[in-house]
Image (cartoon, grey):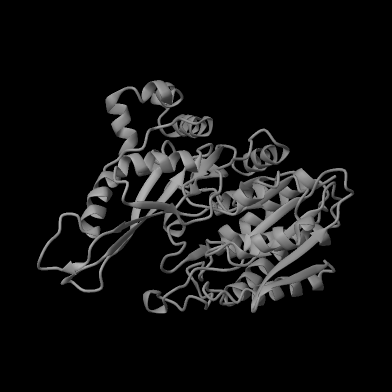
Amino acid sequence: MRRTLVCSIGLLCTTLLFPAGARAQTDWPKYEAQAAELLQQYFRIDTSNPPGNEKHAAEFFCALFAKEGIECQIFEIAPGRANAYARLKGDGSKRPIILLNHTDVVNADPKLWSVPPFSAEIRDGAMYGRGAQDMKSEGMLQAMVMVALKRENVKLTRDVIFLAVADEEANTLGTEWMIKNKRELVAGAEFLINEGGENLIQSNGAVPFWGVNVAEKAPYWLRLTAHGKAGHGSVPRADSAPHRLARALARVVDYETPLHVTPLSQQIFCDMAQVQFPSEKERFCNMEASLRDEAFRKRVSENPDWAFLLRNTISLTVLKGGPQTNVIPAEAIAELDVRLLPGEEPQKFLEEIKKVVADDTIKIEPISTIRTPNESPVDTELWRAFAEVVGRYFPRTVVSPRLTSGYTESQIYRQLGIHSYGFCPFVSTREEADTPHGTDERILIKEFQGGLRVLFDVLTRVAGR
């Protein structure tokens, strides 16, 4: 989700060629001003999930599109909850591209914020609001690109689809509903742009990497349940449910899952080394061999930003026992947040964990939807568009694929044969990038506005005639 120094964008834009299909007299400052004004309105729509109330956001987008003569449909998927769907027609010579965003946001505690979370207050050039980074800003840019394509009368080779879905933060209800009930409106697309990526400005103004998510680790949440005889807490039992579960969990949290270098993780490390560790490029570009060195293996394993790229991860997140301190409960439960690498088989991992637990009396069961990890290629027309456009605006930035530890709905759309990427057209400082789901979530308005032309150029490259 990011861009580079704001002044650089402004200076470069005066010398760049105009994108295919756009008029030379395109009034970008006018588009950028309108985008910021609309973003402020969008931030003020409270779509905290739960309960969601995303229908208000769907109506907001469809009202915008209606003014521009762009047909937009609202699909109510539950009371007060809805998706928005708009489509610009191309000549059909190429398959469609989808601009996907979600309209719901996580809850925000006003007592912890310096401004009301849905006020869209502007301070020191930053607009504050829940969803500023995840992902109302990008959704607004996608909508404005639809408007710009229509106003500028850009001739399209492929349909451009805007899809704003509800309930991404909790249960993926919006996307699941579309695929079940309106599959014909999304199936057949070739490409999809979703949230993701990371484009951070360093203190010197440089943007070393423009990360584009091509894969996500798959959630595979597990529940461990132990049963035993209930009793009084004053008479300990070695085989009580909590004791047996605690011993099993000790083995699980101490277990190091095997390191596995995938082609994607190898490319990520190699790209990273080119910029950050040029003297160690050979080592990072040959991870299989380098990990045989104990010191290097330890260095990688102890870096949380690196280790998750090379192994399935396990986090103990939930513990449940008795309601009273002096009662030994008959049941004890723990839940594990497991994330699997692309290419991993969930059932195989389950058997692995059963061996680690080493207690057949403890029930181990998946509690999340099982999704096989998948990824999108980096040799596509859209990927080349990313590289070309970013390279024009930020010639010293390396466009690199990313594997995210979190989950996005791109994984669902890949199952339909759609190459799906997490691409954010604007940059952020580390301070802003750390605010999603946190306190005082915000975005610099100049960063947001600069992303409009980046995304527009990507669309005209991949869909314009």
Tell which residue pokes out farthest to the right in this image.
91
Where does residue 154 sit, x and y in percent of width and height?
A: 84, 53
Looking at this view, is 153 or 32 the one in front?
Answer: 153
Left or right placement of residue 401 versus residue 57 in this view: left
Q: Residue 445 sits in which quadrant? A: bottom right
Residue shown at the point (65%, 60%) measured from the top left: 176
Which residue is outermost to the left? 234
Please, is residue 267 above or below residue 243 in the view? above
Asked if 116 appears above or below 295 in the picture, the reply is below
Residue 303 placed where, x, y %?
33, 40
User: Horizontal placement of 448 versus 334: left or right?
Assistant: right
Foreground residue, 359 or 148?
359
- The residue most toward the front is 229
* In this picture, residue 125 sits left or right of residue 19: left
* Residue 437 versus residue 201 in the image, above or below: below
Left or right: residue 430 versus residue 157 is left
Q: How many marks?
A: 0
Residue at 46% across / 38% down in the picture? 348
Q: Nearer the viewer, residue 321 or 297?
A: 321
Whether residue 434 appears in this view of the structure is: yes
Residue at 60 percent of width and 49 percent of height: 411
Q: Name the quadrant of the C terminus.
A: top right
Residue 28 in view, yes or no: no
The foreground one among 246 and 300 is 246
Q: Position of residue 42 (x, y in %)?
A: 62, 73
Measuring from the top left, give residue 324's x and y in whole percent. 21, 74
